[in-house]
Amino acid sequence: MINSIRKNIKGIAIEGITLISAIIIIVIVIVMLLVIFIGGKDHLTWEFLTSFPTEGMTKGGIFPALYGTALLVIIMSIAAVPFGTITAIYLTEYAKENSIIAKTIRFAVRTLAVIPSIIYGLFGLGFFIKFVGAHIDGAFFGGELRWGQPNLLWASLTMSLLTLPVVIVSVEEALKTVPQDLRAASLALGATKWQTIRKVVLPGSISGIMTGTILAVSRGAGEVAPILFTGAAYYLATLPGLSDQFMVLGYHIYVLTTQSANVDQTLPIQFGTTCVLLLLTFTLNMSAVILRYRIRKKKNR
Amino acid sequence: MILDKIHTEKMFLYYSEKVALKDISIKIPEKRVTAFIGPSGCGKSTFLRSLNRMNDLIDGVKIEGKVMIDNINIYDKNIDVVNLRKKVGMVFQKSNPFAKSIYENIAYGPKINGINDKKQLEEIVETALKNAAIWDEVKDRLGDSALGLSGGQQQRLCIARTLAVNPEIVLMDEPASALDPLSTSKIEELIVQLKEHYTIVIVTHNMQQAARISDNTAFFYLGELIEYDKTKTIFTNPSKKQTEDYITGRFG
């Protein structure tokens, strides 16, 4: 009798603890979003998005950071999406399932995915800036410092390495949803393997390629560490080109909170910038989730 | 005189060291319907797929002996598989239209063969659909997705798609096994019409179907060609006991 009551109490306690942990998580998310939204909602204006920072970054908008973020993810996608897609095509269409080369590539992709992002930053600094950039300067500009320093291009390429695994895995998943029957049908009509990939497999998996791109963009828009050494700037009065440093949303938040002359004065802008960044990544992720859901539904049909 | 379109001599097929087809020698006449029958796993589909080298797609498949089409060994080193498959078309068990419009499905083959003239493509599409007896059902909605067609229509569309490349031989791997009786009879009617222009080789589980539509029938069992003769002879007076047991339903 007493024993069974004890067991009951134990059961209730465990259920209670698990429930409380779950609620804590929900509360944390809600509080976080609310604080950021309430603090930043006044800044979600067209003017805030389209004007330059003023008065030592205590007033004004975030346009250069938004512009830099957009350029960063665009150049990053131009590099990462075709490269990742081609790798995924090799893995699903050409490589034999258990060949050594396919296993090696898969291992490399998994490894890339778990490397801490700051390491990418260091790699970008060492490889793109100190090696590739410095050699370009030596060969074409007589040693004058042009490409051998942090800039938008190197930062974007570093970021593309970080997002490559996301693209490869998403595209691979999408290519696998194209039924084998369709490949056979195309080949039986006298199509070459490449024609089959180009005209049947790729059109059938375009939404997966889109998903991979969006996820990569979302990841790239939020990361700061990889661009810390490779191109992010504190403040710029002009909009950047490929060989310039650039402002970016994530780093801008860091600058406003820690490097500003008057942190309290920048507080509203910090909230505003955080709000914008959050909305941006949230929207991107949601659209990727929706696309992926549609693909899965198609696969199950 | 009827020519032999396809003939094999002492052909063996191995699935990574395991023998799947043993010593197949057969002569398949031009512009006739030849049916392959036999229980599941007897090798009839494997044999069919080796006639347009679709088995190449499977790892570890090895072929020995001769597989001749128009007196050329299709497993010779200098054979272009892509050209071979244009000449030897294939219709699969499960209809597999592309997720494109009806028109684009048919135009796919001609387009990859380099035909880009719109007028010419339209003609090819119309002829192919007419030859596959589906033109009247789809002529008003060529731009609609092929996936909206019924199963039977999809299969006739796939036949039309195969015909659009202008093959000489059409291989059919149980083309009606997933269809209802009405669609099946339409496909059967179509096959009989097609033999006027094409050499048809069809694999079927359905013995009545083989009896209805084929001129010659080959009976496969455990990877061997047990008996091959005029369809009438196979079904009324088979010379091997195994054949008789199978067609009278004693096994399989």
Image (cartoon, grey):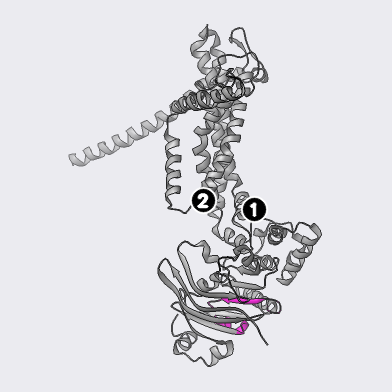
Of the residues under marks 2 and 1, which one precedes in the sequence?
A: 2
A253 relative position to A62: left or right = left
Query: Which residue is at the front of the view, A58 or A42?
Result: A58
Q: Position of residue B184 (x, y in %)?
A: 62, 74
Residue most toward the left?
A2
Q: Which mark is residue A257?
A: none
The chain letter for the residue carrying disc 1 is: A
Q: Amino acid at mark 2?
A: Thr
Q: Which mark is residue A92?
A: 2
Q: What secondary structure is found at the residue carrying circle 1?
A: helix
User: Any magenta on residue B155?
Assistant: no
* Residue lying at 57% horizontally and 46% vertically, measured from the top left: A294
Q: Residues within 10 Å of mark 1 (few under 14, many from 20)?
A: some
Q: Position of residue A63 (x, y in %)?
A: 64, 19
Q: What secondary structure is found at the residue carrying circle 2?
A: helix
Q: Position of residue A88 (x, y in %)?
A: 53, 46
The chain letter for the residue carrying disc 2 is: A
* Residue lying at 64% horizontally and 17% vertically, measured from the top left: A48
Q: Which residues are magenta?
A: B195-215
In the rendered view, tell whether residue B170 sits above or below residue B234: above
Residue A278, located in which quarter of the rendered image?
top right
Q: Which mark is residue A199?
A: 1
User: Any magenta on residue B208?
Assistant: yes
In the rendered view, tell whether residue A252 sits above or below residue B168: above
